[in-house]
Amino acid sequence: MIREPIFLEPVFKERIWGGTKLRDLFGYNIPSPNTGECWAVSAHPNGQSTVINGTYKGTPLDKLWAEHKGLFGTAAKRSEVFPLLTKVLDASQDLSVQVHPDDEYARIHENGELGKTECWYVLDAEPGAEIIYGHTAKSRDELEAMIREGRWNELLSRVQVKPGDFFYVPSGTIHALGAGIVVLETQQSSDTTYRVYDYDRTDADGNKRELHLEQAIRVTTVPHVDAETSYIVEQADDATITTYVSNDFFTVQKLKLGGFLTAEEKDTFRIYSVIAGSGRLSLNGQEYPLSLGQHFIIPAHSGSFRLDGHLELIVSWL
């Protein structure tokens, strides 16, 4: 089986809260001034990435997963579907306050969909920008009462953010990006969202977006507990490697490279997203230029490879 990096063409999603920063910061060819999401590495049926280079050029990622399991190593044995989804989100306005189910609830109530645990690396944030992360209710009855009565300022917990911050958002966590924030999101491959509150916004036809209060009350973790944030920082060659989270859902790292880094890909595939700088990847005697906004997969069992340049990358794997 051929071992070469798999570069992917993203899919863009227009959103009521989207803007133009996916174009302004990354040079993406966005469909409108209300573009909120770049599905950069996705095999989800609601937005398929497509291979843009090499042997598998033109192949949708779900087909690659289905027909070439050897490219993905041990991950292909653990999951029936491609397990991860990498997005870049531009919150020009506040996102709706939402919560996601876990695997068990989604399997039963969402036609076998995966649950949705996710995490955010903050790429850009305007001064004073905030996220909603968690809530103050001490019991499910109190949570329900506060939601039904619209006591949002009392219920919702807010956190100011800056570029370089990282947030782990397990299923069951009430959360929302605030206006002026751009994040790279690593998540389970799921598109199930329960909307709790949307600031009473209306669309172009004057309609409010649907809320999912019954489901949200059932799946929200009560009381809220902040996720642990004990990062591991290591040095290798000319790179600083920060591991933000590593669990059954995914491992997520940042590579900050000022020279070169040699590594080896063994038993699983890894997703790489270039979030700053430029450089090159050398693999199996071939060189591939790297620049801001690119997303690629290095297949399992690719052997040793080398990264050169002044680069920052987010890396994720199962």
Image: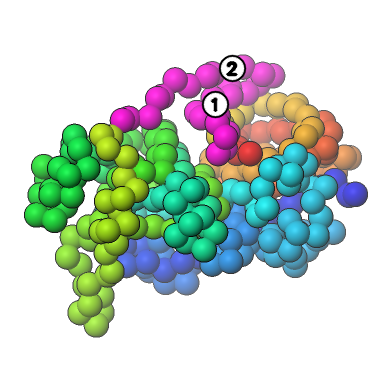
Residue displayed at 70% across by 65% down: 60
User: Is disc 1 surrounded by few (<14), some (14 to 19) or many (20+) residues within 10 Å?
Assistant: some
Q: Is residue 173 above or below residue 9?
A: above
Magenta region includes residue 312: no
Q: Quadrant of residue 150?
A: bottom left
Q: Residues within 10 Å of mark 2 (few under 14, many from 20)?
A: few
- Checking the image for residue 234, the label placed there is 2
> In the depicted view, which residue is nearer to us: 284 or 66?
66
Residue at the spot x=80%, y=60% of the render?
67
Question: SS for tag 1?
Answer: strand
104 left or right of 180? right
In the image, residue 286 lies at what x, y percent? 85, 44
In the rendered image, residue 236 lying in the magenta stretch gets the answer: yes
Label 2–label 1 contact, CB within 8 A: yes
* In front of the other: 63 or 11: 63
Q: Mark 1 sits on what residue? A: 243
Q: Residue at x 78, y 63 (%)?
A: 57
Q: Mark 2 falls on what kind of element?
A: strand
Q: Is residue 295 above or below residue 13?
A: above
Answer whether residue 177 is visible to the viewer in this image.
no
Left-right relation of 238 to 95: right
Q: Residue 215, percent across and down?
A: 32, 57
Q: Amino acid at mark 1?
A: Thr
Q: Earlier in the sequence, mark 2 or mark 1?
A: 2
**Mark 2 → mark 1, Cα distance in angstroms:** 8 Å
Indicate left or right for 119 with 310 as reference.
left
Task: Indicate the amino acid at tag 2.
Answer: Glu
Q: Please state the horizontal and vertical placement of residue 245, each as a whole percent of the image.
A: 51, 30
Q: Which residues are magenta?
A: 225-251
- Residue at x 37%, y 66% (from the top left corner): 15
